Image (spheres, helix red, strand yellow):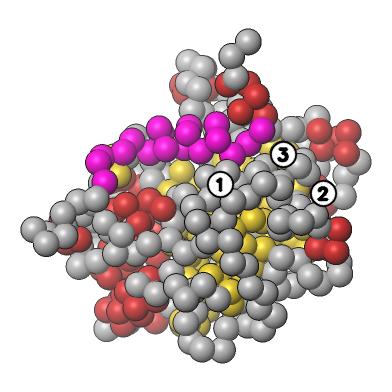
Amino acid sequence: MSQVLSAPRASDGTGRIPLLDIGPYLAGETGARAALANAIERTCRDTGFLVIANHGIDQSLIDGTFEAAAAIFDRPLERKLALKVGDLNIGYLPYGAQIVRTSKVHANTQPNLSESFYIVNDLSAGDPRIVSGDPLYGLNKWPEEMPEFKAATLSYMNAMRPLAAKMVSAIATSLALPDDYFVAEFKEPTTTLRLIRYPSHASAEDNQFGFAPHIDTNFLTLLARSALPGLEVRTTEGEWIRPPHVPNTFVVNTGEMLGRYSNDRYTPTPHRVINDNNTLRHAIPFFYGPGLDAIIEPVATCVSGENPAKYEPLLYADHRRKLNLTNFDHRRKAALPG
């Protein structure tokens, strides 16, 4: 487990995190899918990070979500704690409540220097899964006196799902699979919008980060460009670089489930957040994964006699349950005997 954490300050200027125009692909132009798939294949075998432009998401939706994040975190602490996360990670997560213990790249001993607000697939109280008490589903926690918060964040999530699905389709192409290969397992995708506020890193303790070194555990993450930089990506050589900080773009990175599907052809890349901007920083990552009933196993195009399957089939619901019990203090304490 690496403990070497060098400190980069400049954006990646090497092309290791490419800036890709996906407009032609979204428009269905001839050859655009193949070109994008080739670019995805190259970067997923390297850093696993890319930046997309001309993505079709209205900037007003992005701006509205950043404004919603600032508004929810500006509330008095007691009002935020009234919406605190429970058995499921839905709602407000205060400072000090998450230590990324599952990290395979760094021994994280300090809680993330950040606060978060989680929003998931929005279900109604009458949904059969809620009525039956299914422990894998829960209701979002909305501040009743802030209807604009709910409207802004749900509008954003509704716009992001089709974009994420398009990127998943391009990834399938990059793996020499049918374009619609993942459609069935993403029929009802698991989506989470995590609003995050990072204070200045000047107050950080030793071995503490805004977000500690980790890999994402879903399939794909789309991160709208924040006003301030902070995200850092570790290369295979162990250096930390920052993605190009380009207006009106999304940083896209692969997660652990794509690593399993691809039999480690596309391994997820460690990344971290350091807010050295001497002011508050907000982020709004959108996490996209298969349905909870999906069985994750290596695809045929990534398995051969020389490269046998490295993973047993995994029910995605089991994966999510284990993560929550490991990384979040409120879940760990609840699971302790006595």
* Viewer-nearest residue: 20 or 214: 214
For marks 3 and 1, the one nearer the N-term is 3
To which residue does mark 1 refer? 192
Q: Is residue 38 visible?
A: yes
| Quadrant of res 231 | bottom right
Q: Secondary structure at mark 2?
A: helix
Give x and y (percent) for residue 183: 30, 51
Spatial distance from mark 1 to mark 2, Cα to Cα? 18 Å
The residue to which callout 2 is attached is 73
**In the rendered image, the vertical position of residue 233 relative to residue 71, given as above or below:** below
Q: Residue at x 49, y 79 (%)?
A: 17
Mark 3 or 1: the one toward you? 3
Q: Is residue 240 above or below residue 115?
A: below
Q: Amino acid at mark 1?
A: Thr
Residue at disc 1, secondary structure: strand
Look at discs 3 and 2 and give the one toward the viewer.
3
Magenta-colored span: 311-329
